[in-house]
Amino acid sequence: MGSTEYRLYLDTNTFLHYKYFVDIDWCEVFNLKMATLIICYPVLKELDKHKMYHTNLRIRKRAKKALGTIRSLLNNGIKSKLNDNTIIEFAKAKAKIDWAKEELSNDSVDDQIIACVISDKKRNKYIITADVGLQLASKLRGIKFLELPDSLLLPIQDPRDKKIDQLEKQLSKKPELQFGALEGHSISKKVEIKLVDFPSIEFSDIEKKVIKIGKNLLEEYRGQANIEIPLSDVADLRVTFEQFEEHLECGQKQLLNYLKKFHFCLSSWADIYNLKVIIANNGTAPVNDLDIEIIFPPEYTLFSSDNIERLPPLNFDNNTLHATGKMFLADQVYLDLNAELEMEQSRIYKHLRTYDRDLKIDNRKIYPIEVCRFSKSSVSAELEKVKQNDKFYLDIYFSRFDHKKQIIEIDCSINADEIDEVFKDSIIIFLQEAL
């Protein structure tokens, strides 16, 4: 092109995808004697947006660098001399045109650049762009455009940028903790815990049945001078009826004391609820050295599975029972009573779920938190590491000292702010009864 000055309007991509704009020899590239590079206000706005929000780190850096240079040039005024044959000029913020007449939209960056060119009354105006859409819009309005050669294009991605992107992705990984209660085979924010009436048999009924067995034995052996009491498979004890009556009273008392203790355990366990609290990591990074404290309402008393009194064995060793006590165990009335008590014991174990040691959610095993510290109304635990997709559970037993409720609904939800606190290595969770 000749020695005339040419006005070159730069689009946004010129700053982002090509050799740095102040390092390009514009006159040599387009065979000019004099060039004025014009930067429009909409281009500045787009660069500012890309500096903050573009997903590509390299583009963000390029936009930031370009804006820094432009800010320095602005300190010299609306026009700045780049070199002996190139000037940089800033267009007015708003183009003075009839937008409707020109069929342009003020919401389109491309249309705003075209508006700046139209409002410029000087000659030899070109838009510098590789954007096919902007090229077509320019051509339809009789505006010329030029395209920088591919030799000035930057590599798609600098190897260092790729490494930085990978590091950023790693840094963006974070744990996402989920807290709740085990409900069936899923984690629930709210769980209903039912209190079952145990035992269905009263101790007075047990006592009556044992006394009835004693009376039946007395009637069976009444009037006999010598009564054999089985001591073992090879030896018996021969006693008079009066002696048998004394032995029978002793065996009956021993058996009743044992059954009273067994019934007391049944009744004690009946007032206890079981809650399995789940801590799951659904995020993309592990949590290390996690401290957990779960605080219950003040009317709750907590137990670990270890400090609940275990049920004594119902089928105790006959050798520990007085000789005549063995005669009670062979009676049909006692056999029926024994079956009823075993059923009660099975119901309690099922209620408390004490044998659920192989818990799973979505076919993934849930690991028990073995080391816990229980106080009256709180439990705390430490987890060395909660890896991605790991799930742990706390086995908590509790009772309510003020009154019994047939169903308790526990609200296990915690809000996002509280979950974020886990990154400070500790989380405190307050459980409440749902209203």
Image: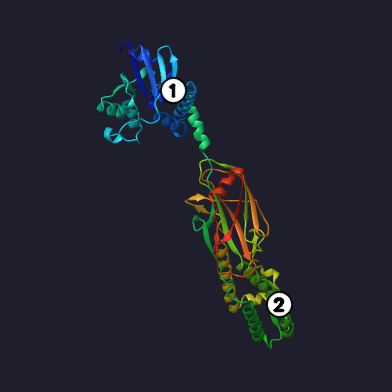
**Residue 302 x/y as whole percent:** 64, 60
66 is higher (above) or lower (below) than 339: above
Q: Is the Cβ of the residue at disc 2 closer than 8 Å to that at disc 1? A: no
**Residue 288 x/y as whole percent:** 60, 42
Residue depicted at x 52% and y 59%: 190
Q: Which mark is residue 15?
A: none
Residue 37 in the figure: left or right of residue 2: right
Using a 10 Å C-alpha cutoff, classify the residue at mark 1 as few (fewer than 14 neighbours), some (14 to 19) or many (20 or more).
few
When asked about the image quadrant of residue 111, the answer is: top left
Q: Quadrant of the N terminus?
A: top left
**Colour scheme in the image?**
rainbow
Q: CA distance from mark 2 to mark 1?
A: 110 Å
Residue 231 in the figure: left or right of residue 360: right
Q: Which residue is mark 1?
A: 78
Using a 10 Å C-alpha cutoff, classify the residue at mark 2 as few (fewer than 14 neighbours), some (14 to 19) or many (20 or more).
some
Say what amino acid the circle numbered 2 marks.
Answer: Lys
Q: Which residue is mark 2?
A: 253
Evaluate whether residue 354 shows in this view: no
When asked about the image quadrant of residue 242, the answer is: bottom right
Q: How many marks?
A: 2
- Observer-nearest residue: 267 or 243? 267
Evaluate whether residue 296 shows in this view: yes
Say what amino acid the circle numbered 1 marks.
Answer: Ile
Residue 385 in the figure: left or right of residue 141: right
**Residue 411 x/y as whole percent:** 55, 59
**Which mark sits nearer the N-terminus, 2 or 1?**
1
25 is higher (above) or lower (below) than 9: above
**Which SS class for mark 1?**
loop
The nearer-to-camera label among 2 and 1 is 1
Q: Quadrant of the C terminus?
A: bottom right
**Which SS class for mark 2?**
helix
102 is higher (above) or lower (below) than 348: above
